[in-house]
Image (tube, rainbow, N blue to C red):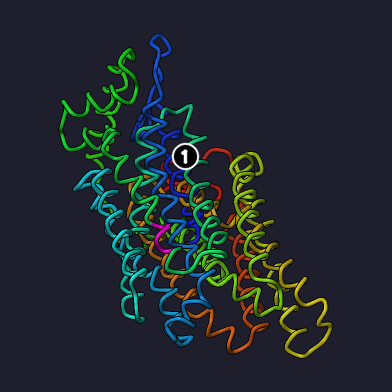
Amino acid sequence: MYKNIANGDSILMAIEKDMEETESTVQDEIRAPLVLQDEKHKENNFMVYLSTFVAVCGSFAFGSCAGYSSPTQSAIREDLNLSLAEYSLFGSILTFGAMIGAIASGPMADCFGRKGALRISTVFCTAGWLAIYFAQGPLALDIGRLATGFGMGVFSYVVPVFIAEIAPKNLRGALTAANQLMICTGVSVAFIIGTVLTWRTLALTGLIPCAVLLVGLFFVPESPRWLAKIGRKKEFDAALRKLRGKDADISQEADEIQDYIETLQKLPKAKIFDLFQRRYLRSVTIGVGLMVCQQFGGINGICFYTSSIFESAGFPADIGTIIYAILQVIITALNALFVDKAGRKPLLLVSGAGLVMGCLLAALSFYFKTYEIGLAAAPALAVTGILLYIASFSAGMGAVPWIIMSEIFPINIKGAAGSLATLTNWFGAWAVSFTFNFLLSWSSYGTFLVYAAINLAGIVFIIIMLRKEVATVPKEFGSNLAGGERS
């Protein structure tokens, strides 16, 4: 999920990478110039900014869903008399709903349009928040959490796709950062205001981005690319004109989009079993393997239950949560600036090393507390470890796996392979968030040692599998990142 919070950077940066690659080479199988700037005619990007603002309200809603369970754990368990197992189910069922939403998001976006899919996901989130607000027992809580998870899963796909399809090339970088920043901001705002609001009131705040999104969708155009895909020529021209401004010449861009759609529809559709052919196996192993490294390293357990971790370590939960929230936004913003300059593999290795160190520091803190050794140092070690962990994750492991995934999959299997990797990601998010509290009950320091070992194994995986790092990735098959050859 958390990337997915990293969601998240992730999908939009991946889409941006695809667009830039396909726009640059005429002889490629696909030319995907979703937007071409005609410098002779002045374009007005106001509608692009407005449409992006409306869309990233979905990103903020995504973050609000993800950040809700951390500051509310103690209050919900006390008010509704929930057992540890019942609250763990409540926390983790969000990601189960997101798995369903992620699977349904593609067909929904194609059938109902990007705006239609956003409306449906917003309705699910709204219904979910209301169910949580009025809940008097675990059943209503779980139904509400499942519904918000479904909406979150749809947002994770549709928001970045919509933004990529409306944005001019020269603005995509900034809008990519806006998407990811709004996800992290949603998480951080939930963390911060959750320290002062009751859990029911915090649920009501989740309705705010949903309301803005629903109203805003009435004032922005549908994706021109989707309209072209379904053959609605008149609406396609009107939407593109509205996005580029009444004085812009859209004829060349319209022709290029139509060419892209026609070429895309001629490509053969890969099936899931095609991914296990020898020529694709290495790139699929890397794509799925990086998702395993990202999720099973413990991010969702730590994100969902940050407050309880600080409380267990003897550090003030409110202060720790606020610091965590602010640091997350800052590191995510810096990562957007340096991800292309620093390189994929170095960022992953530095990020992985930080994750291992953060887990070891947290494990040491809980070890001291368990055996009553150096109790004065335990809280400081815990907060240092958790903050180092989230900073390291935000710096690399959160977004880079999604970028690499977009670079190593050939275009003809990108949809099927991306679906498999995304499903693996959401499954890992569910597994970690569901088992985290049980692991802490088993052994608090042992839990973080397990995550440290998994992150260390992830570093080994990255060193072995990502043999070379190259600036450009062959589109016919894989890349030197995967150490593969063209088929």
Marks counted in the figure total 1
Work out whether residue 404 or residue 45 is closer to the camera in this orientation and state it.
45
Q: Position of residue 16 (x, y in %)?
A: 45, 38
For the point 53% across and 53% down, the residue is 184
For the point 60% across and 50% down, the residue is 329
In the image, farthest residue toward the top:
40
Work out whether residue 158 or residue 276 is closer to the camera in this orientation and state it.
158
Q: Is residue 442 above or below residue 462?
A: below
Q: Position of residue 347 (x, y in %)?
A: 65, 51
Does the magenta segment cover residue 272?
no
Work out whether residue 369 or residue 415 is closer to the camera in this orientation and state it.
369
Magenta stretch: dominant SS? helix
Amino acid type, callout 1: Lys
For the point 29% across and 28% down, the residue is 257
- Magenta stretch? 202-206
Q: Which residue is mark 1?
A: 17
For label 1, the crowd category at 10 Å Cα-Cα, with few meaning under 14, some 14 to 19 and many 20 or more, is some
